[in-house]
Image: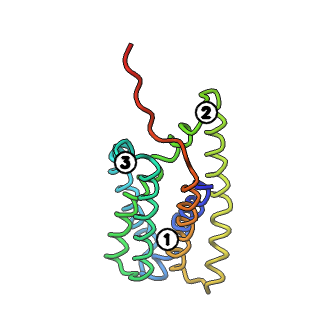
Amino acid sequence: LTVFCYMVGYMAIETFFSSFAVTALGLKPSLAAVLLAISYVSFLAFALPAAAVARRFGRKRTVAAGLAIFGLGLLAIWLFPTLPVVAAMLFLGGFGWALVNINCFPMILDTSTDESLSGTFSGLYFIATTLAGTLGPILNGRIIDLAGRDYRVIFLVCPAFFALSFLALQGVRSGEVKAAEPAA
C-alpha cells in the first residue's frame, strides 16, 4: 500500500508536469521536459547517499523523510509556481525521491523472513508499481478535469498520496537494513 500510494502520487507529476509547465509557466514543451529532468539529475546524484542515510537512520525513517521532503517541495510549487521555485523544488524533490525509491524495494525484500519468498515479495512490489502506473494517470487526469484543467492541482494531489503512503508506512514493522554477517 505504501508503494502503491507514493507511485500514484508520483504519476501525477511524471505524467502531467509538462502540461503544467506549458500552461502555467509558459514554457515550450521541450523546455518543460528539461525542467523536469532536474529532479532526475538530483535523484541520480543522491542515489548512493540515500542508501547510506538508510544504513545510518533506518529505512523506514529515511523513506518517511523522503516523502516529506518531496511532498513539501511540491506544495511550495503549488504556492509559488514560478520558474526559480519550480527548479529549486524539483532539485530538492529528486533528493527526496532518492530517499524513497532507493530504499523501498530492499526494505520490502528484507521484510521477508524466508529467502525463498523473495520472488513473491519482488512480485508484490512490481504489482503495486504497475497498478499505480496504470491507474495513477487515469485518476490524476480525472482530478485535473474536475479542477477545471488546472494542472497546478498535481502539486496537491501528489503530496496527498505521499501522505497516504506515509500513513501506510507507519504499519511497517520490519525491513530495516540487516547487519552484515561476519566473514568466515
Where residue 182 appears, x then y in whole percent? Answer: 38, 20
Q: Nearer the viewer, mark 2 or mark 1?
A: 2
* Residue type, label 2: Ser
Tag 1 secondary structure? helix
- Disc on the earlier residue, 2 or 1: 1
Position of residue 102 relative to residue 83, above or below, is above
- Judged by depth in the image, the label closer to the viewer, 2 or 3, is 3
Residue 18, disc: 1
Q: Which residue is mark 3?
A: 57
**In the image, residue 116 above or below residue 24:** above
- CB-based contact (under 8 Å), mark 1 and mark 3: no
- The residue pinned by badge 2 equals 118
Image label count: 3
User: Is the residue marked by circle 3 packed among few (<14), some (14-19), or many (20+) residues within 10 Å?
Assistant: few
Which callout, 1 or 3, points to the residue nearer the camera?
Answer: 3
> Which of the marked residues, 1 or 3, is nearer the chain's N terminus?
1
